[in-house]
Amino acid sequence: MNELVKQQWLIPLFPLVAAAIQSLLPRGQRKLSAGLSITAMTASCVLALRALFATFGTGSEHEVARAVWNFTWFRFGSTGLDLGFVLDPLTAGMAVMVTFVGLWIFVNATGYMAEDENFTRFFCFMSLFAAAMLGVVVANNLLLFFICWELVGLCSYLLIGFWYFKPSAAAAMKKAFITTRIGDVGFFLGILLLYWQTGTLNLYDHGHGALEQADALSKLAGWWVFSMAGLIALLLFFGAMGKSAQFPLHVWLPDAMEGPTPVSALIHAATMVAAGVFMVGRMFPLFTAGAAEGGSTPVLDFVMWIGCITAVLSATIAVAQFDIKRVLAYSTCSQLGYMVMGLGAGGLVAGQFHLLTHAFFKALLFLGAGCVIIGTHHEQDMRRMGGLRQVMPITFVCYVIGSLALAGFPLTAGFFSKDEVLLVTYHRSQWAWGLGTFAAFLTAFYMARQIFMVFFGRWRGGDDQKEQEQAHEGGHAHEHHEPHEVSWNMWLPLVVLSVFALFMGWLGTPWVGGNLFQRYLAPEEIAPGASSLVLWLSIGVGLLGIVLGWVIYGRKTMEHATEPDPLATMLGGLFTLLNRKWYIDELYEATIIRFTATCGVFFRLVDKLVVDGILHAIAWTAWALSQIARWAGDEFLINGGFETSCESVRIGGKAFAKLQSGRVQNYFRVLTLGAAILLLVYFFA
Amino acid sequence: MDTAFWIISAVTVIGAVLAMTLRNLVHCVLALVLFFFGIAAHYFLLHADFLGAVQILLYVGAVAVLILFAIMLTRHVTGTEGQREVLGGKWWAGMGTAVIIAGLLWAVIRRDQLAALLPTGAAKTSVAEIGQVLVTRWVVPFEAMGVLLTAALIGAVVIALEEFIRRR
Amino acid sequence: MNVPLSYYLMLSAFLFAIGLCGALSRKNAILVLMGIEIMFNAGILNLVAFWRYKLFATPSAQLFAIFAIAIAAAESAIGLALVIAIYRQYKSVDVDEITSLKG
């Protein structure tokens, strides 16, 4: 494994090279571009699998298998900057997940983007993103981590605003970047603080690494109730709050649905948003350092509650959305909250397990939504869908599997991972567990709502159009607007991911190999004691949610696209509140954004008056000096001098010309004068 | 014998002054003749007899007559010769210069020792001696003089005759 | 006579100056030529005076004076011929009017 870690850098290298080549490709080279991306991801997947297999069986009972390789990037004086790569179960598992899911998303994207003219640019950015994400995963050094973290954010920006000519997309890309940037400020401060306190940016360094000094850091005082380790962890968590869309920085994730659906699948479901959770997992020693009885630290409690609030808040909003991708976006937000809650409750294994399973079934759901969108000719409003299960059977089956996994239906992957999270939370805080269970109920409910709205009932897509056409009595063929199943390169990834969504969960259960995943990932952690209350309650709320969804939406499906939502009629104003996202965006707009805009106006004024004023003054002074120089030097001296000398020559010439009078007697007189002078000189000088 | 010198000098100077200041052109020529005679008298006084004779022959006999002829040939049609203005433009410049030269020469002569010389012996030279030396020692300048005079003669004729030839 | 040489030199200088004054100031071209003749004679007088006071034994100086007189005569002949020719062209012998070589 020690030799293999030196080749870890190859895993992000293949997509990076692919991106570099694709950036130079002309627009028409579609097959080559897609082929490069898929080949690169396959190669990285193979390497990641090799690394994964290398980590099996090398760990011990209490020590996780880990190999690092650090090297100096450049020196300045006696210090330098290092970079490093790590190979341990966390990294290997994430690398395999990212490359595998990414691979199938790329395959789906060849179908989704088939009609778009910026095909090559899309795959270039996607490859670059994959490279950056894999860089985040394999990094052992906070500098490399941060570089790739920012690159991931950049690619997210580029891909959200892929259709930059749409004003909504342009606004969304800016919102995403700026919101995550706010979190990144805290992240960077955390890095600086860590470097200051430990003197190194390497995470693991044979005992000298930053994480290895976490216990020492926890003895130092930090701020308020947080120890130094806790303070650093808190600052780092701000970065995770931004990247993983936790409350209050969650506002960018729903808007990020402006990007193409494969982008939403890869970046905003499976990988980038999971980077924040991964980061918490990677830095977990800092979070748990100095733990009291029961294993909690102030920062972990903070993390848990943030995750809990996010989970519940997002789930409530998802219930009242009409855009198919928005529902999934808020669902992602909510599930990320689950992961963060699990981590905050001290369950590294639970959080990471849920991350891995969520990646698969959320990617599956997003790809399914993408298939639905393509199949209905770019329709995204659920009220105008319906009855698609007859027309798109494969998509329907896979989507149902994904939804069941998300809802935590027994025996799916999501069931096991969510149960782990709730279990761990139960042992830490019952209030949080209660809220988490409520969120699970909502999750099941809104997924059922979505399925019944989209796939059952009658096709409502042509409702508005049919009325218009009847009014005009015109007719283009109706078949053009009817939904249809998608091509094989779009439903094949769905099938593959469905398999994983169904069976992957068995890795984490006690009945297969005895908590295989937990022993693999964090052998030093104590498995939470099983609780049948948690188990049966989570099964119960999941089924309750599905049944309620059928009662409201399935028993009597929507007849017409313009009908009001049945839930809206039941809840009234509450539904509007949820639909408008608790008006959080409006709150931000009225306060922070308005304040920033005012500052901007103020500073613009300062710029215009003061800075420009000084500039204009300097320019005017230079101009005035130049005018003086021109007048004095050029006009007066050079031109004037020249003209004066020419004039004097002319006058002198005219005077001398008078000597040539043509009169001989005058010549004689001059001659005599000259003779007199000569005599004078000769005789007297 | 100093008085002879003074009288002859006075005559010469008066002749020169009159020649240069009279209004009537012919009167000027006559004064010039007086001047020439005065110079000839000085030559005699200086025991240069042959030279004095030549002076009278040549200058008075030839040059003065020539000048008279020239005056006659260039008389203004109206008959008034040089009556309107005697002196040319800016005459004072020339006069001043001449005065300066005179002053310079006088200053030089005054201070030079050479000038206090007195005449030496009284040996006279005869014309025969002059002739003798003319054709032996100074024969080349003599012949050259002949050529020069011939050239001058031809030249004068050519210049004065120009229009005559062209008219033909 | 016992006149020192300087008297003759001063006389000749005086005559030269008179001739020069006239040559430079008179309007008529012929009078200018006459002034030149006066200058010539003054110079030759100077020459003869020097012969008498220094080189009395040799006759060569007289010859010098004879040559000078001859040349002066030739020159005045040419000069007067020129004046006649000019008179024919310009119908005037006024030196102030003959300015066709004016620069």
Image (tube, coloured by chain):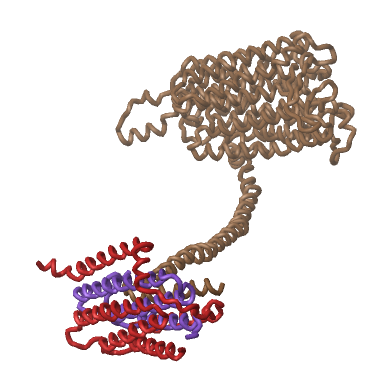
Q: Quadrant of the C terminus of chain B?
A: bottom left
Q: Is residue B156 above or below residue A363?
A: below
Front residue of A422/A641: it is A641
Front residue of A129/A653: it is A653
| Residue A566 in view of the camera | no
Front residue of A636/A279: it is A636
Tell me the quarter of the picture where residue A465 sits.
Answer: top left
What is the residue that sits farthest to the left in this orientation?
B168
Q: Residue at x 53, y 79 (%)?
A: B117
User: Horizontal placement of C69 versus A681: left or right?
Assistant: left
Q: Is residue B125 above or below residue A600?
A: below
Q: Position of residue A310 (x, y in %)?
A: 69, 34
Q: Position of residue A142 (x, y in %)?
A: 74, 29
Q: Is residue B161 above or below residue A494?
A: below
Marks counted in the figure total: 0
Q: Quadrant of the N terminus of chain B?
A: bottom left
Q: Residue at x 73, y 28 (%)?
A: A74
Front residue of B104/A339: it is B104
| Residue C5 in view of the camera | yes
Chain letter, colour red in render: B
User: Horizontal placement of A394 versus A583: left or right?
Assistant: left
Chain letter, colour purple in render: C
Chain letter, colour brown in render: A
Q: Position of residue A411 (x, y in %)?
A: 67, 14
Q: Position of residue A22 (x, y in %)?
A: 52, 23
Tell me the quarter of the picture where residue A3 sits.
Answer: top right
